[in-house]
Image (cartoon, helix red, strand yellow):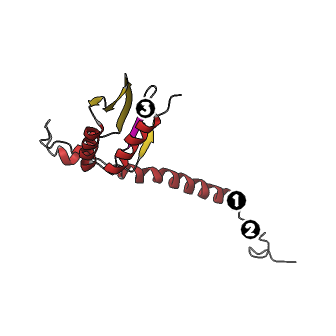
Amino acid sequence: MRIPSLYRDRKSLELQLTPMIDCVFLLMIYFLWSSSFAVVEMSLPSTLAAQNAGSGPGRSNQRPSPEADFDKIVIRVLRDGIAPAWQVNDSPIASLAELRRTLMAIANIKRDAPVVIDPIGDVPLGEVIDVFDITRLAGFQEVQFAAEM
């Protein structure tokens, strides 16, 4: 007769690791996914705290820089009867020399502003090329042409 023993009659113990690994991966994905948003929220640029350090309503005495006022420069080339006419952001320009002075003044403020040349109507190609040349001589790098759709 055999004496019963705890060690001899023990069956092999099998651990089910698949559900535990699934849970670990799900938790890892959750934390990685949710933590990626925290980095973006903390790095958003904000100048509100720097300008309004007090708790009450206040006005900043600083004027915005001239560079902040430029979105893009639109030069319209029109045909006024026989003679050409030009407009820079809807301000009429009398001659090509005045157009060059205006563009040079703008280039001194912000040279990397995008320029759009918009020929309206039956404008000869030579006049549009003259405006393009003046724009490039003023130092603008990004010059685009508007087209009708």
Coordinates of residue 71 in the picture (x, y in percent)? 33, 39
Badge 1 amino acid: Thr
Give left or right: position of 115 versus 59.
right
User: How would you rate the neighbour count of disc 3 (Cα within 10 Å): few for under 14, some for 14-19, many for 20 or more?
Assistant: many
Task: Name the residue rendered at 38%, 32% in the picture.
Answer: 77
Circle nearer the N terminus (2, 1) = 2
- Whether residue 47 is visible to the viewer of this picture, yes or no, is no
Coordinates of residue 29 in the picture (x, y in percent)? 56, 54
Residue indicated by mark 2: 13
User: How would you rate the neighbour count of disc 1 (Cα within 10 Å): few for under 14, some for 14-19, many for 20 or more?
Assistant: few
Circle nearer the N terminus (1, 3) = 1
Mark 1 or mark 3: which is in front?
3
Task: Name the residue rendered at 39%, 51% in the picture.
Answer: 141
Instruction: Provide the residue span drawn in magenta.
Output: 112-119
Circle nearer the N terminus (3, 2) = 2
Residue indicated by mark 1: 18
Query: Is 59 colored magenta in this rendering?
Result: no
The span from disc 2 to disc 1 (Cα, nearest Å) is 15 Å
Q: Is mark 1 on a helix, strand or loop?
A: helix
